[in-house]
Image (cartoon, helix red, strand yellow):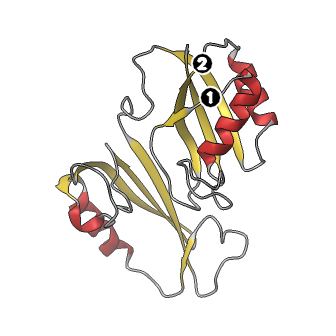
Amino acid sequence: MRVAIGISYEGSPFEGWQSQPSGNTVQDRVEKALQAVAGVPVRIAGAGRTDTGVHAVGQVAHFDCDVERPGSAWVRGGNSHLPPEIAVQWAMPVDQQFHARFSARARSYRYVLYNHPVRPALASRHSGWFHLPLDIDAMRSGLDCLTGRHDFTSFRSSQCQAASPIRTIEQGTITCVGPYIFFDITADAFLHHMV
């Protein structure tokens, strides 16, 4: 049986999404928690990989397991074995053809920048900070130029393993609320360090 799950996490204490030898990744922690519920090893596949310190509110993953449990068992049982920074939000059986990574139609990221002369304290883990005034109209114009289907070679990490640098930014917006600037970007996929 294939099960899809939605996961949220505060990524500050973890080494990103993808499993690492240290065992200190979101994937490692979720697999261990689901294994405790299933009583057998569980390997999950995520819709994408996030870097160290990145947070998520709706990361989708899936796993295959011969052990049947109701969705509430995967959610509550899984969460009882997870650190407070990670939570399974929902679980549901899906068709065997579903794949969290390859079935995803889009991915969205939000970056938060605190634009104020003095650095933030409470938001320090959840936002960047820049002390000088920024030209929001120029930033919006720049983002408009990137919207659409383009070759993003110049925007990717030298360690990027994607076969093609061609991506489509479907939507990009910049919104200001007081000293906070929100960058919301949706694309068909993202390259390593692209945004």
Upstream in sequence: badge 2 or badge 1: 1
Check contact, mark 2 vs mark 1: CB within 8 A: yes
Mark 1 residue type: Val
Mark 2 residue type: Cys
Instruction: Looking at the picture, tell me which residue is in the foreground, 17 or 21.
Output: 21
Residue 192, percent across and down?
A: 37, 58
Q: Secondary structure at mark 2?
A: loop
Q: Secondary structure at mark 1?
A: loop
Q: Is residue 192 above or below residue 102?
A: below
Residue 138, percent across and down?
A: 30, 75
Q: Residue at x 65, y 67 (%)?
A: 125
Residue 153, percent across and down?
A: 22, 63
Q: Residues within 10 Å of mark 2 (few under 14, many from 20)?
A: some
- Quarter of image, res 141: bottom left
Can you identify the residue that label 1 sits on?
42
Q: Is residue 43 above or below residue 112?
A: above
**Is 133 on the left or on the right of 192, as rendered?**
right
Can you identify the residue that label 2 sits on?
65
Q: Which mark is residue 1?
A: none
